[in-house]
Image: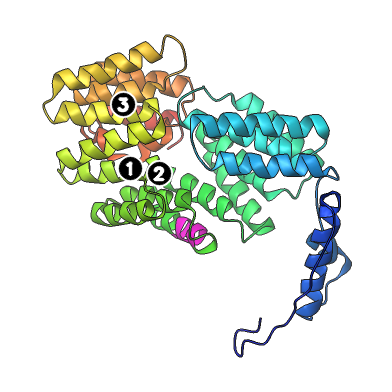
Amino acid sequence: MKVTNGYHLWSERFDRQMEGIFEIQDEIALAVVEALKVTLLGAEKAAVVKRSTDNPEAYQLCLKARHAWYRWTDEGFGTAEQLFQRALELDPDYALAHFGLADSHTAWSFIGRQRADPRFARTRLETALRLDPTLAAAHGALAVVEGFLEFNWVSAERRCRHAIEIDPRNAHLYAAYGEVLQALGRHDESLAAYRRSIELDPLNPFWNALFAMGLLGTRDFEAALRQGEATLDLAPDYWLAHVYRGAAFQATGHLDEAIRSFERAVTTSGDVPYVVGLLGHVLAVSGRRDDALAQLARLEERSKTSYVSAVAFAHVHAGLNEVDEAFGCLDRAVRECDVWIAFTLAFMPALEQLRPDPRFAELRRRIGL
């Protein structure tokens, strides 16, 4: 439809069986181009109809897997990994499935159920890029690996820029770029990247929550609170929004509200250990020592059967003013390439009391910040 007068530029019905889904996509894409009177060169036309598998079932599995990925839950990432793996069984040369498997593995480590393996992620992503060098999403995921697991920030930033050049309308790429910039302390640039991801996909709660995280980095805590509320308007049980809202409440001295936000985050995330650590920290600084120790005991019990982020332990120990124990945990997080360590040392306000200690600066140096 033409915006200025409401005139229909193009309307056509396509009736095909599911087996012909790729042909339908190609026909629609080229029909739209024709309706818009756009002239494409050969390479541009190939880009419009580009796909990386001829197997419709593998394609559908990847769509379902990406939908599960965005839930950012233990169940969601587990489902995504299974679906991406099934897609690869159907088409071992499906670049998007190789990327998805690596991306799910890395993102899953953020919720603390497993420790990220940089070698596994890099191998899968390099395979995806060997199969399709123009797969921008794989470049973006590899940038996250290079930055947050390998601490190679120069390469991570360069790869983010390259990915965006390939696909400048991909919201996920701007979010990854924002994360890298925020870790580097370039907060205004980070906010611009997060804002762009929202412009491209405004109803996605993940991008909106990341923008709240970006505001924490600028220390504009009131704005972070407002953005957290806006994200919760989109998705009332989105645990990341509760986390960053809780962090903003704590930073502004509203400890009771912070406790409630972190408690809600623990519930809605399914007891993500990192969030349990944040709750333990605010309980400790609120004078509720026994309750903080109870959260520490939960983490210790969980660690007997699954991976628990060392950063989670560090938060509780810091809240209890057990400074040496907190630094011991942060040191272990660096050695384990914990995905949360860069965010923690870069901008998260919960450990502000540790910043004057020379050990804090040394930890930042070790991860290239």
Amino acid, disc 1:
His
Amino acid, disc 2:
Tyr
Say few, some or many: other residues with alpha carbon within 10 Å of mark 2 (under 14 / 14 to 19 / 20 or more). many
Residue found at x 57% / y 42%: 156
Residue 93 vs 219, above or below: the answer is: above
Helix, strand or loop status at disc 3: helix
Helix, strand or loop status at disc 1: helix
Magenta: main secondary structure equals helix
Measure how far apart labels 1 and 3 are at the Cα level: 14 Å
Residue sitting nearer the eye, 352 or 75: 75
On residue 238, the disc is: 2
Q: Position of residue 268 (x, y in %)?
A: 38, 36
Say few, some or many: other residues with alpha carbon within 10 Å of mark 1 (under 14 / 14 to 19 / 20 or more). many
Q: Position of residue 7 (x, y in %)?
A: 67, 87
Say few, some or many: other residues with alpha carbon within 10 Å of mark 3 (under 14 / 14 to 19 / 20 or more). many
Identify the magenta region. Answer: 192-198
How many numbered dots are placed on residues in this image?
Answer: 3
Mark 3 or mark 2, which is nearer the start of the sequence?
A: 2
State yes or no: residue 195 in magenta: yes
Q: Given contact means CB atoms under 8 Å apart, are the residues at marks 2 and 1 in contact?
A: yes
The quadrant of the image that shows the N terminus is bottom right
Residue found at x 62% / y 86%: 6
